[in-house]
Image (tube, rainbow, N blue to C red):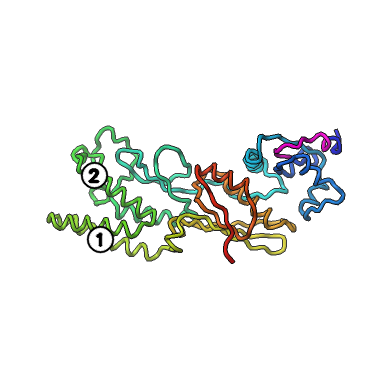
């Protein structure tokens, strides 16, 4: 069947479409609220397409489409299809790795802290993403030196002999039967709570908690314990000096920046959690032609956030654009509302 007949038969439903070139190879995937109108827009003689799409249309030999229930379903299907097929005329991010996160296993009786690249609905707390991972590795190293929680992944259903970390004062050894009293567990969970506060950048609350504990140990003549917390306080003050704090009141957000030059673009991302920059990432895109910035940003968002990751409640863009379906999709992924706003100029 030729293209004209297929255009006539295309439904006015939402869905995705796949443009095919020579050899039935998919060269472009798009989504539409109305497939018929969108597909026809490519082949009108008066079509106002950018340079990239004009070149793509000249290569089209056939097309297919998949009808979906709504535009949200079309967006999800499009993102997955692009990731799998990597059509040459779509925006493709050369970054298919899952980013590293810190996982605090508060779902366990004796929580630990570990590095993971997969987020699961298991009741644990996840922090990140940390990009590049060097910042996270330094944070993990600091936590293990200053907060004595376990780093092993042993099943503690039965007791073990404490390892060298306990001898070095870097673990409270919940593995040992003699260190599993109720007061031991309360002390351990207090330490876990402090780790959580440190990762989340809750400086004021953590310092207050540690000072109270130091005073309590001092009053009880437990001077060695009090000295340990004093050293921890000093280490924390020094660690916080090196953090890139934007403004704690800003909370969690991703900030996206854009720079265009000729047919190339650079997209820069900042990952801000509790007002602290925990990561950044650059993306370089080539052969964009004169693609509009709004289309570029929309395509980037759909590709970048299609992977499994922790979403912030707010995403700041470098320009004003209406991304109703993308906002709905991100809110669904997060489980609560995600706001997409433009940066103030």
Quadrant of image for the N terminus = top right
Magenta part of the protein: which range?
A: 6-17
Residue of label 2? 186
Q: Vertically, is 126 above or below 158?
A: below
Residue 316 picture quarter = bottom right
Asked if residue 344 lies in the magenta stretch, the reply is no
Left or right side of 120 for 73: right
Specify few, some or many for label 1: CA neighbours under 10 Å numbering under 14, 14-19, or 20 or more.
few
The x, y position of residue 75, in whole percent, is 64, 42
The x, y position of residue 177, in whole percent, is 21, 37
> Marks 1/2: CA distance?
21 Å
Left or right side of 115 for 65: right
Residue 234 picture quarter = bottom left
Are dots 1 and 2 in contact, CB under 8 Å? no
Question: Of helix, strand and loop, which one carries label 1?
Answer: helix
Residue of label 1? 231
Question: Image point 22% across, 55% down: which residue?
Answer: 213
The x, y position of residue 235, in whole percent, is 30, 61
Q: Nearer the viewer, residue 339 or 245?
A: 339
């Amino acid at each position: 069947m030729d293209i004209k007949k297929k255009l006539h038969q295309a439904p006015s439903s939402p869905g995705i479409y796949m443009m095919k070139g020579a050899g039935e190879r998919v060269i472009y995937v798009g989504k539409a609220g109305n497939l018929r109108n969108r597909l026809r827009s490519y082949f009108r003689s008066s079509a106002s397409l950018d340079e990239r799409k004009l070149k793509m249309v000249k290569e089209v030999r056939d097309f297919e489409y998949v009808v979906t229930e709504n535009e949200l379903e079309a967006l999800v299907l499009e993102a997955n299809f692009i990731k799998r097929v990597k059509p040459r005329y779509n925006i493709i991010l050369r970054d298919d790795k899952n980013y590293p996160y810190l996982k605090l296993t508060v779902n366990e009786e004796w929580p630990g802290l570990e590095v993971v690249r997969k987020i699961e609905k298991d009741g644990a707390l996840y922090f990140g993403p940390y990009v590049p991972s060097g910042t996270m590795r330094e944070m993990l190293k600091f936590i293990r030196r200053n907060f004595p929680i376990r780093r092993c992944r042993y099943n503690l259903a039965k007791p073990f002999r404490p390892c060298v970390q306990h001898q070095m004062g870097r673990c409270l050894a919940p593995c040992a039967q003699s260190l599993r009293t109720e007061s031991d567990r309360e002390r351990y969970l207090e330490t876990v709570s402090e780790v959580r506060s440190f990762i989340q950048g809750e400086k004021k609350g953590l310092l207050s908690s540690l000072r109270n504990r130091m005073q309590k140990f001092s009053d009880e003549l437990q001077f060695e314990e009090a000295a340990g917390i004093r050293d921890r306080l000093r280490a924390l003050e020094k660690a916080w000096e090196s953090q890139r704090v934007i403004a704690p009141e800003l909370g969690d957000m991703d900030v996206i920046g854009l720079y265009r030059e000729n047919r190339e673009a650079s997209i820069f991302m900042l990952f801000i959690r509790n007002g602290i920059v925990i990561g950044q990432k650059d993306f370089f895109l080539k052969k964009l032609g004169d693609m509009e910035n709004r289309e570029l940003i929309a395509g980037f968002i759909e590709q970048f956030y299609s992977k499994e990751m922790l979403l912030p409640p707010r995403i700041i863009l470098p320009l004003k654009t209406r991304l109703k379906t993308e906002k709905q999709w991100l809110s669904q992924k997060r489980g609560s509302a995600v706001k997409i706003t433009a940066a103030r100029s």
